[in-house]
């Protein structure tokens, strides 16, 4: 267990201010985060990563509106089941609209826009969706609990129960892959929870006892077959079906759901989701809801605390600081900045104060790499690369003679770019 000092140093709210990642404004409203250029850079990297990975895995990324008519949520059952978590209706031209708390009704309407064949299924409809939920003031907490967030959401339309369970497994595979990229280990940094319904609570849950029994059993058996350890939690399901939640703890020990995979036996009936089977008849579809990376805001909070603000190179808002030793090296530093920027590497020049002060400031900013340029570097057309973190190597510059994080070596700018691009490409944690 981390001591109080370490917990404070890792608290994402504290680091968010110190590293200039995000802020809140009473004039904007509680629970509505404002992301600075640095914070927005982290978001952008996370969003690009997950969209590219999902597309590789056969997801169809779409874009749908942030609002919809209230009748859509009556049809889905979110209203009144989620009424207390929804913003008040907006009246426009005598019709009531809602800021959306969920994406599923939009995706189902997209699916219904044309007929589908069994050959198209499973159809994985995905979106980075901005959602709005009215969290109680006492529940708001930094980026971990907010009133608007961007969810990496998807709804998988399946042709059979077997196909649906197979898609649950593929969704968990994706979640475990994503967690691995972040350096999160199953069992240590996160665990699975099978969230169950309550047959007696018909106000909270869709009434279909047989469907609840069957779907809970399907998810339970899948986790057992997968060899995954999991806890079970009653009365934690979605109103339309059970779910497998990925649970993580923040630096203060509070547990929250980061990612989720949900089995839905309700919406296919409510929306009349069908497809044309191999025999030419209309058949009822099955639906899996899942989130691969969760809410961008919440995963940012977890990652800020995990890395204590020292992000891996691919996620770092500023990847390289260029430090000219004096003003006479400024032009060469500017040339290096241009080369790095053209290569897609986020770099800045730090000048003005003494070199020692600038090095200390760069360390406080937790920038992964610094490049120092002085007389020798200008004369040799090289640069001295230094990493943020010391690591063990097999020689004076680490394994293979390359400069490790924490080591120093004069390299050509082209070699520096190649090295950094490879580290970014592999998303080394």
Image (cartoon, rainbow, N blue to C red):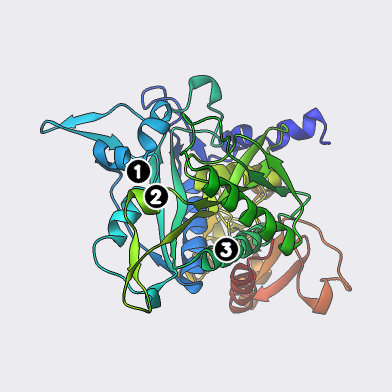
Q: Nearer the viewer, residue 238 or 377?
A: 238
Q: Nearer the viewer, residue 68 or 120?
A: 120
Residue 332 visible (yes or no): no
Image coords of residue 402 (percent x, y): 76, 75
The residue most toward the left is 93
**In the depicted structure, whether residue 146 falls above or below residue 417:** above
Contact? badges 2 and 3 (CB < 8 Å): no
The residue most toward the right is 394
Residue 312 visible (yes or no): yes
- Left or right, 106 with reference to 424: left
Q: Residue 272, located in which quarter of the rendered image?
A: bottom left
Which label number is shown at residue 165? 3
- Look at mark 1 in the image and give the residue it sits on: 76
Q: Secondary structure at mark 2?
A: helix
- Left or right, 123 with reference to 335: left
Q: Secondary structure at mark 1?
A: helix
Dot 1 or dot 2: first in sequence order is 1
């Amino acid at each position: 267990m981390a001591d109080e000092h370490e917990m404070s140093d890792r608290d994402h709210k504290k680091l968010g201010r110190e590293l200039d990642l995000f802020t809140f404004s009473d004039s904007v409203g509680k629970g509505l985060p404002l992301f600075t250029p640095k914070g927005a850079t982290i978001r952008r990297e996370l969003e690009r990563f997950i969209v590219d990975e999902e597309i590789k895995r056969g997801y169809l990324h779409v874009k749908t509106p942030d609002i919809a008519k209230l009748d859509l949520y009556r049809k889905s059952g979110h209203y009144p089941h989620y009424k207390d978590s929804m913003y008040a209706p907006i009246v426009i031209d005598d019709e009531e609209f809602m800021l959306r708390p969920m994406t599923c009704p939009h995706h189902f309407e997209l699916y219904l826009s044309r007929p589908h064949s069994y050959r198209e299924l499973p159809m994985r409809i995905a979106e980075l969706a901005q959602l709005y939920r009215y969290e109680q003031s006492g529940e708001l907490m930094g980026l971990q609990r907010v009133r608007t967030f961007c969810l990496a959401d998807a709804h998988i339309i399946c042709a059979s129960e077997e196909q649906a369970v197979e898609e649950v497994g593929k969704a968990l595979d994706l979640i475990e892959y994503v967690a691995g990229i972040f350096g999160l280990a199953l069992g240590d940094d996160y665990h699975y929870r099978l969230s169950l319904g309550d047959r007696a609570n018909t106000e909270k849950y869709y009434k279909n006892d047989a469907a609840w029994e069957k779907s809970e059993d399907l998810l339970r058996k899948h986790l057992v077959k997968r060899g995954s350890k999991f806890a079970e939690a009653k009365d934690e399901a979605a109103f339309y079906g059970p779910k497998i939640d990925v649970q993580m703890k923040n630096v203060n020990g509070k547990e929250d759901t980061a990612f989720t995979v949900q089995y839905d036996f309700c919406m296919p009936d409510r929306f009349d989701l069908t497809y044309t089977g191999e025999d030419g008849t209309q058949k009822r579809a099955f639906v899996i809801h899942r989130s691969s990376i969760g809410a961008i805001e919440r995963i940012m909070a977890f990652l800020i605390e995990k890395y204590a603000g020292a992000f891996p190179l691919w996620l770092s808002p500023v990847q390289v600081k260029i430090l000219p030793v004096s003003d006479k090296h400024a032009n060469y530093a500017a040339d290096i900045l241009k080369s790095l920027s053209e290569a897609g590497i986020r770099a800045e020049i730090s000048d003005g104060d003494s070199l020692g002060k600038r090095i200390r400031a760069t360390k406080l900013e937790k920038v992964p790499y610094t490049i120092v340029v002085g007389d020798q570097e200008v004369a040799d057309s090289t640069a001295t690369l230094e990493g943020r973190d010391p690591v063990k190597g097999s020689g004076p510059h680490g394994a293979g003679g390359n400069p490790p994080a924490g080591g120093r070596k004069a390299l050509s700018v082209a070699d520096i770019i190649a090295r950094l691009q490879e580290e970014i490409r592999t998303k080394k944690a």
